[in-house]
Image: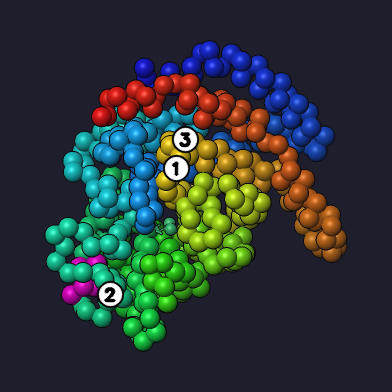
Amino acid sequence: MSLTDVARPEQHLSVVEREHDKDFAELAARLERDGLTADTLVDAVLEFEVALPSWALATGGTRFGRSPDSGKRRTLLEKMEDASLVHRLTAAAPRISLHIPWDEPTDIDAVRADAARLGLGFDAVNSNTFQDQPGQALSYKLGSFSNPSAAVRRQAIEHHLHVIEVGKALGAEAITVWLADGSNYPGQMSLRGSFERVRESLREVYAAMPQGWRLFTEHKPYEPAFYATVVQDWGSSLVLAQSLGDRAQCLVDLGHHLPNTNIELVVARLIGEGRLGGFHFNDSKYGDDDLTSGSIKPYVLFLIFHELVLAKQERLPGFDPAYMIDQSHNLKDPIEAMLQTVDQLQQAYAKACLVDAARLAEHQASGDVIMAERTLKRAYETDVRPLVAEARRRRGGALDPVAAFRASGYRAQKTAERS
Ligand code: RM4
Ligand code: MN
Ligand code: MN
């Protein structure tokens, strides 16, 4: 069975396709009344692409345990095969983002060849100084870039230079730096000194990047540091980006905000300063929960995409965010969770494309609060499922990726092959 067959299992299509054609025609007529052309919107949806995280293609766990990994997806090749399938079914996930050393390629040429065969590219590479690795000389227990010891900082810098080399060899064009650095108790570290040390270490990493590369700093308010995280908020992240140079930008992980933070406002601020570098999509109820995008707060996701689509339409300078997913799947099959996630992102993006920006601006100018809100809600409350399904179909993907995946037998086949 080829991956193309998986995207088009015949018996599945015949029923679904007929119903889809009807739904799409109805939606197209409804959109026409609003002066929108369905075909133009399908093209717009097809412009959205998101990278899959290598680390989320294996079953995740919690501090308390792990459920058995049914598909035994352990090697990088297996993860790339799964990622490629997600792309074929969704037509929107053509790249994978690697975590080093979790997915350190042992043979770069072979990985490149596999990626080419599978039709995959590489998005930002991720460093990891948030855990000590086997055989590592010095511990990051008290921080990496922020560590008072110059030798520990040197080790962390060397790791980042290595990650850049790996990324260069794979054709990636960005590095994402998330630091666990921080303190659990008042007095444990110097609040100003630790930040300065991070800034100085990052300068060296920034200087080592090849032409055309970008460096993304990813903030997070707490965990594992429970008192003071060094890069805890978007303000700290922005200061770092501004200190480093034009090719340093901020990465927004949707789970890395304290409860009730207005994330779309954070996004708007970073866009306004030309410093929105990328996203880690996920959803959460309480903290860094890494749940499926759109599963808990779909309206927030839409409002974030509204800011993104506005910035794209306005062609703002420096606006070219790297869209990536960062999730952990403890309960769901990781492939199904990814299919569901990409679909949710496509839907949020499609809804944002429906917003009548000109009319919204008029209502804002005249102070018509109700009509301004209704303009957003009119887009948000539209059922865009036929639109994104049609977009996927036109690119050779599946109308309903999860259903197509289940009908394909891929999981059973891979479980047998990989055990
Ligand atoms: C962190 C952060 C990073 C991710 C690691 C696995 O909380 O979100 O982006 O790489 O988890
Ligand atoms: Mn993240
Ligand atoms: Mn996280």
Magenta stretch secondary structure, dominant = helix
Q: Which residue is mark 3?
A: 336
First of labels 1, 3 by sequence position? 1
Q: Tag 1: residue type?
A: Leu
Residue 125 in sight here: no
Checking the image for residue 331, the label placed there is: 1
Residue 366 in sight here: yes
Query: What's the distance in space between the residues labelled 1 and 2, CA to CA?
Result: 33 Å
Residue beneath the point at 71% across and 46% down: 380
Mark 2 element type: loop
Mark 1 element type: loop
Dots 2 and 3: beta carbons under 8 Å?
Answer: no
Measuring from the top left, give residue 317's x and y in whole percent: 55, 59
Q: Tag 2: residue type?
A: Leu
87 displayed left or right of 198: right
Measuring from the top left, give residue 182's x and y in whole percent: 36, 74
Report the colour scheme: rainbow
Which of the four quarters of the rendered structure image does ligand 3 lie in? bottom left
Mark 3 element type: helix
Q: Residues within 10 Å of mark 2 (few under 14, many from 20)?
A: some
Dots 1 and 3: beta carbons under 8 Å?
Answer: no
Q: Nearer the viewer, mark 1 or mark 2?
A: 1
Q: Which residue is mark 2?
A: 142
Q: Residues within 10 Å of mark 1 (few under 14, many from 20)?
A: few
349 displayed left or right of 23: left
Query: What's the distance in space between the residues labelled 1 and 3, CA to CA?
Result: 11 Å
Residue beneath the point at 26% across and 71% down: 141
- In magenta, the rendered stretch is 151-156
